[in-house]
Image: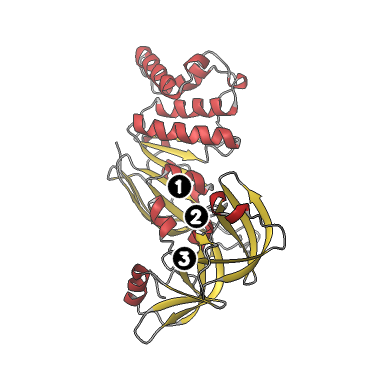
């Protein structure tokens, strides 16, 4: 129903009036003020599900509020269906927004809450009833239509909030951390409900979260932000497999990626290997090709490996030594929290791979390795992935 285009979007909050410049952590400050969002560029296709993800204060909610019209755009252009909407009032943008705190009217029933935006538009009663009944059926809340919000659980209230948004059949549906107030079980259930919802309604979704699990499971593409700047845009698999820098590598994936000080070696015939302590591991053909294309020189690097890509299989000359701090049995796998190369990290070991039901207690010695196809090589100074950006 709608394409959305954000072109060179900037959000600047003025400095305080007391003559002092208060610089929030890591945000850039100019003479004009604090840069909450910097040069944000994104093209969103019709009916695409985009997730903005990042830590608190990264600018994701501010970006969403600019799309909604709740925040003024300092610089740049925002288009919805190729129409410039910078100065268009929120009510005229044909968008709907679902907030973190439900924002339901406590004195109204569920039906009245869902009817409210349509009544404001003076939609005929028969159309209102049809839209509300249809939305309630999609969300499984038909039996709650005559209840007040206080009689509903958190998950049910969030369904009502979503229902109130979709009855308008908006071109763009904005969601600002809608699941953060729910417990873990309800979050899992509601994630599944949102996935089913987007199959049934023909809106473009822009979803904000700090939870990378939500981002990975919901998004067609993920926009990862830090300090007001886009770090990487890609499908969930792309940002997991090919993080462009250490921030993305550490932010995406649970448990997070392990990082070790190491060396990138290049032989006389141009072959690349990584060395971590005494272990030397030749990189895969694809990684060789990417590094060679950037003409990356041998250098000190940070080597990143995901916990589930590490193996305890003994490979001579490729073993790294460590000590176990904590062993967590997770059912199908054991999470070993270890210290190796002076760094804390995690190894995920399938329980079936534990030879002779071996257990690792606190202080146990351990040796591990990894394959050359799963190692990520980051520059020491820029923290960029040297496969994709040698600078």
* Label 1, label 2: how far apart the Cα atoms are: 8 Å
Q: Position of residue 187 (x, y in %)?
A: 54, 36
Check the picture and name the quadrant holding the C terminus.
Answer: bottom left
Q: Position of residue 343 (x, y in %)?
A: 63, 68
Task: Evaluate whether residue 64 shows in this view.
Answer: no
Q: In whole angstroms, how far apart are the C-alphas of marks 3 and 1? A: 18 Å
Task: Identify the residue shown where x is 61% and y is 70%.
Answer: 321
Residue 358, visible in the rendered structure: yes
Disc 1 secondary structure class: helix
Residue occupied by mark 2:
252
Q: Alpha-carbon distance for marks 2 and 3?
A: 11 Å
Q: Secondary structure at mark 3?
A: loop
Image quadrant where residue 218 sits: top left
Residue carrying label 1: 216
Q: Which residue is mark 3?
A: 245
| Residue at the image point whose x is 45% and y is 26% from the top | 163
Where 181 sits versus 77, above or below? above
- The residue lying toward the viewer, choosing from 313 and 189, is 313
The answer to which of marks 1 and 2 sits earlier in the sequence is: 1
Pick the front one: 174 or 275 = 275
* Secondary structure of residue under mark 2: loop
Q: Residue at x 41, y 45 (%)?
A: 219
What x and y, as percent, mark residue 22?
63, 61
């Amino acid at each position: 129903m709608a394409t959305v285009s954000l072109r060179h979007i900037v959000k600047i909050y003025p400095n305080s009036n007391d003559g002092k410049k208060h610089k929030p952590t890591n945000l850039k400050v100019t003479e004009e003020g604090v840069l909450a969002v910097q040069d944000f560029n994104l093209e969103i296709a019709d009916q695409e599900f985009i997730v903005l993800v990042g830590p608190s204060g990264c600018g994701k909610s501010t970006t969403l509020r600019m799309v909604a019209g709740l925040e003024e755009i300092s610089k740049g252009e925002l288009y919805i269906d190729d129409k410039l909407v910078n100065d268009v009032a929120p009510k005229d943008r044909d968008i709907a927004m679902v907030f973190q705190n439900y924002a339901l009217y406590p004195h109204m029933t569920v039906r009245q809450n869902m009817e409210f935006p349509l009544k404001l538009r003076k939609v005929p009663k028969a159309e209102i009833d049809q839209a509300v009944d249809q939305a309630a059926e999609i969300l499984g809340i038909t039996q709650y239509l005559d209840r007040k919000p206080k009689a509903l659980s958190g998950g049910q209230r969030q369904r009502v909030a979503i229902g109130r948004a979709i009855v308008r059949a908006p071109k763009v549906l904005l969601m600002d951390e809608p699941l953060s107030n729910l417990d873990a079980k309800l979050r899992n259930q509601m994630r599944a409900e949102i996935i089913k919802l987007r199959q049934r309604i023909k809106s473009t979704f822009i979803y904000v979260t700090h939870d990378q699990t939500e981002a990975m499971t919901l998004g067609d593409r993920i926009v990862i932000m830090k300090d007001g700047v886009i770090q990487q845009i890609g499908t969930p698999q792309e940002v997991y497999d090919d993080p462009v820098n250490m921030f993305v590598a550490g932010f995406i994936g649970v448990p997070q990626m392990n990082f070790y000080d190491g060396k990138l070696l290049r032989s006389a015939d141009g072959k690349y290997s990584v060395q971590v302590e005494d272990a030397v591991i030749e990189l895969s053909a694809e990684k060789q090709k990417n590094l060679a294309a950037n003409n990356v020189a041998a250098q000190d690097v940070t080597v990143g490996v995901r916990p589930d890509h590490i193996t305890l299989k003994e490979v001579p000359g490729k073993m790294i030594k460590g000590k176990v701090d904590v062993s967590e049995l997770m059912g199908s796998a054991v999470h070993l929290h270890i210290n190796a190369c002076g760094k804390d990290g995690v190894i995920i070991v399938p329980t079936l791979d534990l030879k002779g039901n071996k257990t690792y207690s606190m202080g146990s010695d351990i040796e591990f390795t990894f394959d050359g196809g799963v190692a990520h090589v980051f520059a020491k100074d820029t923290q960029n992935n040297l496969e994709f950006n040698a600078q």
